[in-house]
């Protein structure tokens, strides 16, 4: 379901960005505006990024095979990270270069009214896709704030599109201010300054997206709600005495792997344990369809101590043993 909603948002963003890209390039060519050219490059990057996200969503849906027994879910996170890098390099880098070039060699904007018309149309297109992305993300985030929702989200296409469209709208405002200031004060250099401002905006957005995508690519756990639901199902299974969730990890927005350590009743036979595990896996998947694999380790569960606590306990044991040894080697009292 998450993948379906993500595709809707990405398709809408792709259509909007394609229209905006063509409009901006025509305006940049006609007016010679550096800020407009930076915005056109920005839109090209956004359009290409939508294609990469769609490719990632397609690859993530591929079934497991011999080479990838857990499937291709993390390809979505990989391509999301690539998108963040492209925004930083092709988006921010090129816009910064264009701004520096225009500051070094300023020239007046030809027919700035064309730029204003294009900026208005671009804002209309970008605003429509931004609204679609915002509505979808608002449904997914629940009661938490937007920044906290981005941090918790396991569905990067949705928040990447939202961030890109937000950056596009802010970039349009910067381009408008730069064009207006360059015309009003007869200072073409301000158009280049606006281009550098757009590059800084894109660089900041890229760093945020790269950070979030990197965490998902490395592996982030499932939500507390999912973990608690899995624990409750496992604890209620017949013959299970104790439960410990070793880990949960997202392979994709709707693909979760769970590893459990279970202590079974000593009276259960091996066939009964196998039946219990099969039933448990089925119940977990029925209650949490996003859980695609459950690994169970049947063994006694020892209480887990923090690493510092284990170190101190071992040091005390060694100290006690050393004391006993020294005591046994000490000469008898006379």
Image (tube, rainbow, N blue to C red):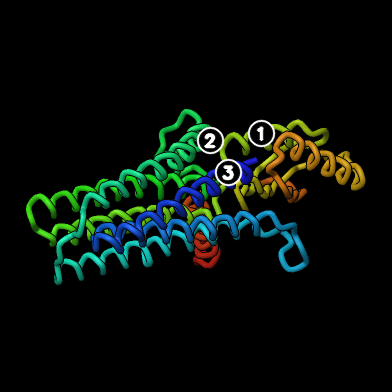
Dot 3 or dot 2: first in sequence order is: 3
Q: Is residue 217 visible?
A: no
Marks 3 and 2, how far apart at CA: 14 Å
Residue 298 point in image, percent of width and height: 77, 48
Question: 204 or 318: which is nearer to us?
Answer: 204
Question: 132 or 136: which is nearer to us?
Answer: 132
Secondary element type, mark 2 = helix
Q: Are marks 2 and 1 in contact (CB under 8 Å)?
A: no
Judging by the rendered image, the residue that carries numbered circle 1 is 229
Disc 3 vs disc 2: which is toward the camera? 3
Residue 268 point in image, percent of width and height: 88, 40
Secondary element type, mark 1 = helix
Residue 196 point in image, percent of width and height: 23, 60
Position of 202 with respect to 197 (left or right) is right
Disc 2 vs disc 1: which is toward the camera? 2
Judging by the rendered image, the residue that carries numbered circle 3 is 8
Q: Which mark is residue 86?
A: none
Question: 13 or 282: which is nearer to us?
Answer: 13
Judging by the rendered image, the residue that carries numbered circle 2 is 140
Question: 317 or 118: which is nearer to us?
Answer: 118
Secondary element type, mark 3 = helix
Dot 2 or dot 1: first in sequence order is: 2
Q: Which quarter of the image is occupied by the N terminus? A: top right
Is 236 drawn above or below residue 210 in the view shown? Answer: above
Mark 2 burial class by Cα count in 10 Å: few <14, some 14-19, many 20+:
some
Which residue is at 27% across, 51% downward?
114
Position of 259 with respect to 187 (left or right) is right
Which residue is at 60% across, 58% downward?
74
Figure quadrant of residue 6? top right
Which residue is at 49% across, 38% downward?
132
């Amino acid at each position: 379901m998450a993948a379906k909603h993500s595709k809707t948002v990405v398709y809408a963003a792709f259509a909007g960005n394609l229209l905006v890209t063509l409009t901006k390039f025509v305006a940049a060519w006609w007016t010679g505006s550096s800020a407009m050219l930076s915005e056109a490059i920005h839109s090209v990057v956004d359009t290409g990024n939508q294609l990469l996200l769609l490719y990632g969503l397609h690859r993530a849906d591929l079934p497991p095979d011999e080479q990838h027994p857990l499937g291709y879910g993390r390809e979505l996170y990989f391509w999301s990270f690539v998108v963040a890098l492209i925004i930083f390099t092709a988006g921010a880098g090129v816009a910064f270069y264009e701004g520096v070039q225009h500051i070094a060699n300023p020239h007046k904007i030809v027919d700035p009214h064309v730029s204003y018309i294009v900026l208005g149309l671009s804002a209309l297109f970008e605003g429509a896709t931004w609204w679609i992305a915002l509505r979808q993300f608002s449904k997914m985030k629940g009661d938490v704030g937007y920044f906290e929702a981005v941090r918790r989200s396991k569905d990067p296409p949705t928040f990447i599109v939202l961030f890109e469209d937000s950056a596009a709208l802010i970039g349009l405002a910067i381009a408008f201010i730069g064009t207006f200031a360059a015309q009003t004060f007869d200072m073409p250099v301000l158009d280049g300054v606006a281009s550098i401002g757009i590059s800084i905006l894109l660089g900041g957005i890229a760093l945020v997206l790269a950070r979030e995508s990197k965490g998902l690519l490395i592996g982030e756990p499932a939500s507390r709600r999912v973990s608690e639901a899995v624990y409750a199902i496992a604890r209620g299974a017949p013959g299970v005495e104790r439960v410990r969730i070793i880990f949960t990890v997202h392979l994709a927005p709707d693909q979760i792997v769970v590893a459990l350590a279970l202590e079974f009743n000593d009276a259960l036979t091996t066939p009964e344990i196998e039946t219990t595990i099969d039933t448990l896996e089925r119940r977990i998947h029925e209650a949490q369809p996003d859980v695609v694999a459950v690994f169970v380790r049947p063994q006694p569960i020892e209480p887990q101590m923090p690493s510092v606590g284990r170190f101190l306990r071992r040091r005390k044991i060694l100290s006690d043993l050393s004391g006993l040894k020294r005591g046994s080697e000490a000469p008898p009292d006379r």
